Image: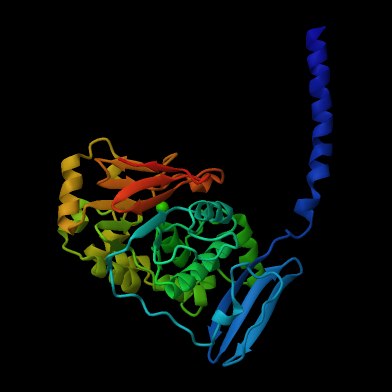
Amino acid sequence: MKIASVLARLGLIVLWFPLLLKAQSPAFDSQPSFKDGPYVFYEGATAIARWITEEGLTVDTLEAGQPMTACPGFSVAFDPSWVQPGAGFTPDSRTAFRKVERIAAVSDIHGQYGLLVTLLKAHGIIDADSNWSFGRGHLVVLGDIFDRGDEVTELLWFVYKLEQQAEKTGGKVHYLLGNHEVMALKGDLRYVHKKYRYTMARMGMSYDQLFGKDTFLGRWLRSRPVAISINRTAFVHAGLSRQLLEMGLTFGAINDLFREQILDQPEDSILADPYLAYLYSENGPVWYRGYFEDDFTRGQAQWILNTINKRHLVVGHTSFSEIVSLFNNRIIGIDSSIKLGNQGEILLIEKNKFYRGTLNGEKIRLN
Ligand code: CA
C-alpha cells in the first residue's frame, strides 16, 4: 500500500516534471534581459561607447571635445564626463605611502557590487548616496573584482568613481591587480559569468578585447600596481614568497614587470624568462598561498617582513569565512568570501590597530 502510494507520487512528479520545465522555459527561449556597460573604445580621434540594454547593443561615437551625455542602461556610477577621446592613465610610480591615518582594505569582490556598497557604507567610507566620505583615508581594493559574479562592470566604474572622488579630498583608492584581473586581460575565461558571454556575443568581441589597450577600462587596469605599502603595512593580492624576495625584486620592479612584460605578452615569451615565469606562476604575487599552509612558521613570516622592511602584510586570494590574522597581525588574510554573495568583511587600520569590519557596521579588534 505504502509502496503503491510512493510510486503514485513518483509518477506525478515524473508527469509534472516536463510541465514544470516548460513553465520556466521562456527565460531560456527569449533573449536574456540584462544591462551591461558602457565599454569605451578609442579609435583615432574618437571615443566609442558601446553598451547593452534590453533592446540590445547601443553605440555612441564621440568626437574630440564633444561632451558625452548619460544614456539609459549605463552603470550607475559611470560619469560620461570622464570620457575624452585619447585619454590615458599614467601609472603611479610611488609604491610606498606614508602618514595615512585611516586605512581600509577589501579583497576578492568577484562581481558582488551590492556587498561592497553595504560594507563601505557600514564603515563610513562612502555616504548614503555611495559617494566618497573617507576624507584623507586610503581604501585598498586588493584585487579580484573580476569573474564569478555578474556586476563586474558596475564595480569597475564604481571603484574608478571613488578613486576620482578620493583624490579631491586628499584620500586615495589603491586598486591592485589580482590573478583574475590578469586572467581577464589575458582572455582566460574559465571563471567569467555567463552574462559576459552574451555581452561578448552581442559586441562581437572577446573578453580581453573589451579590456584591450585601446579601451578606457583596459588602460586604467594596465596602470594598476601589484604591490604597495601604506605606513608599515604592505599589500599584495596573494603573497610574497621567500623565493620571490630572494630574487631581489622591489615592489616597483614587480609592478613594472607585470605592466610591461606580463599583461600583454604571450605566455610563451613569459615562460621563457625565469623572472617573468616565476611572477606569473602559482608562487607569484597574485597566486601564492604559502602563508596559509600548516608548515608556514612565525619565523618565516618575520623573515619576509624584515626583507621588505614592514611590520604587517595584508593579502587576499585564500578564502576564509572572516578576516584572519597570523602571528599577531604579521600576516592578515582578508578574503572573507564575499564571492559567495551573502557575507564579507573589510579590514580597518587606525592608529596601528587592526579591526574586522562587518556588514552590519561592527568593528572587532584583530590580534
Ligand atoms: Ca585571487
Q: Determine which quarter of the picture holds residue 104.
A: bottom left
Determine the residue positioned at 79% across, 22% down: 10
Along the line of sight, the residue nearer the viewer: 240 or 44: 240
Q: In which quarter of the image is the C terminus?
A: top left
Residue shown at 49% from the left, 56% from the top: 124
Q: Can residue 207 be seen?
A: no
What is the x, y in percent for residue 200?
61, 67
135 relative to 91, above or below: above
On the rendered image, what quadrant is the N terminus found in? top right
Nearer the observer, 237 or 182: 237
Colour mode of the rendering:
rainbow
Q: In this view, does 6 lie above or below 129?
A: above
Residue 191 rendering spot, x and y as whole percentages: 51, 53
* In the image: residue 274, left or right of residue 341: left
In this picture, residue 14 sits left or right of residue 292 = right
Name the residue at 57% across, 92% down: 64
Viewer can see residue 245: yes
Q: Residue 149 at what x, y percent from top left?
A: 56, 53
Residue ranking furthest to the top: 1
Task: Answer with the quarter of the image where residue 325 lies.
Answer: top left
